[in-house]
Amino acid sequence: MGLTDQECEAAGCGRKCAGSASRASKPAAPAGTPSVPFLLLMLVCQPLNRRLVVIEGEEDTPIGAMPGCYRLGWRHGLLEEVAKARDVGVNSVVLFLKNEAFNDNGLVPRTIRLLKDRYPDLVIYTDVALDPYSSDGHDGIVREDGVIMNDETVHQLCKQAVAQAKAGADVVSPSDMMDGRVGAIRAALDAEGFQHVSIMSYTAKYASAFYGPFREALDSNPRFGDKKTYQMNPANYREALTEVREDESEGADILLVKPGLPYLDVIRLLRDNSSLPIAAYQVSGEYSMIKAGAVLKMIDEEKVMMESLMCLRRAGADIILTYFALQAARCLCGEKRIIIGDNVELSLSEKYWLEVQPHHRKSEACKA
């Protein structure tokens, strides 16, 4: 826009985010703020996951605690899943990969380059944290006495973010909850010429019990203690405001709340107190509960899925990260059921349970 950094800060408009969402009417966004469509993000995990999950090798492996999600093989499974998503209008993915944190030839950069080569217009969000890469499962470097070392961790996070930007990431997403990491990452990206790469900060990430299935998938459960010293207390509502002010001042482009549905009040709090796009993360526990309830015939999977996403949107989320992205987009496109064999109709959750039984033979087609 031809403005200096100081002028941007004074106007409150911040940087233009790749794939950022439309602003809410209250509070009003400053003049000149870009207006872009609401986003539904498909999550792509790695070496052990799928929301998508990306792993080395060619085989796709089901994730037991997350029906319908897989650890996707690096080339074929990943590309096929992204192609399916694009076919129904989902053109943004979040990559969660377990490998070298900032090796330029590691799985994360190779995956980004592979996707950008095949789909240049794909918007790629990456995770910036150390828990998938460490032996202890914590988001930061751990001292011998068990203390998380904040500043030393931030230094490594900056190297990780720059490596991802070099590979072609559009948005880096620090999920670690270390103090000062947004400002440090912004400075590191700018110093390397990546002013165009945006930051989606995990602004309000709570020490929640809803993360269980995903941690199983990535094998990222803490080997000792818990994450309560750096993630937020679920009982603390007002701390989110402090985090919002810090992230805005440090240069965040998107503010994220995690988990989603149990924290609708926090999503609304951020929406009412910031003109930046607000993201909500519908986490693995939320996803798996809906899947389990559907398998037990206790709820209507499709209706509950769509209602849960609508509630996140109603609370003020401009962006939703969800393992339901492909399934929800298909529903919005009209592809709601799966046909197995001789015109036998199954829900998507029922189809999953058939898939994990190898003795079942099946042919399938989508019914528009």
Image (cartoon, rainbow, N blue to C red):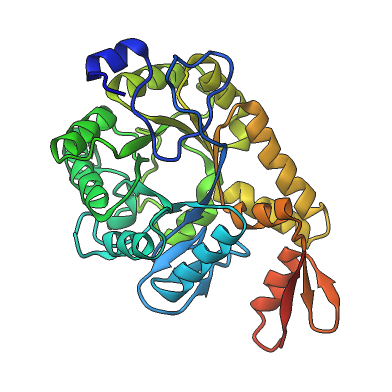
Which quarter of the image is occupied by the N terminus?
top left
Q: Position of residue 303 (x, y in %)?
A: 79, 48
**Residue closest to the far front:** 2
Q: Would residue 48 be seen by someone viewing this image from the given angle?
A: no
Q: Is residue 15 left or right of residue 60?
A: left
Give the tally of numbered discs.
0
**Residue closest to the far top:** 10
Which quarter of the image is occupied by the C terminus?
bottom right
Q: Who's the residue at 56% across and 51% down the image? A: 284
Q: Who's the residue at 36% across and 48% down the image? A: 127
* Nearer to us in this view, 262 or 274: 274
* Nearer to us in this view, 19 or 327: 19
Instruction: From this view, report whether residue 192 is shown above or below residue 232.
Output: below
Instruction: From this view, report whether residue 178 is shown above or below residue 339.
Output: above
Q: Position of residue 121 (x, y in %)?
A: 42, 53
Q: Would residue 26 be seen by someone viewing this image from the given angle?
A: yes
Q: Who's the residue at 19% across and 59% down the image? A: 103
* Nearer to us in this view, 110 or 203: 110
Q: Is residue 193 left or right of residue 177?
A: left
Name the image quarter holding residue 145: top left
Q: Position of residue 31 (x, y in %)?
A: 44, 15
Q: Who's the residue at 25% across and 42% down the image? A: 146
Q: Is residue 27 left or right of residue 292?
A: left
Instruction: From this view, report whether residue 215 is shown above or below residue 149.
Output: below
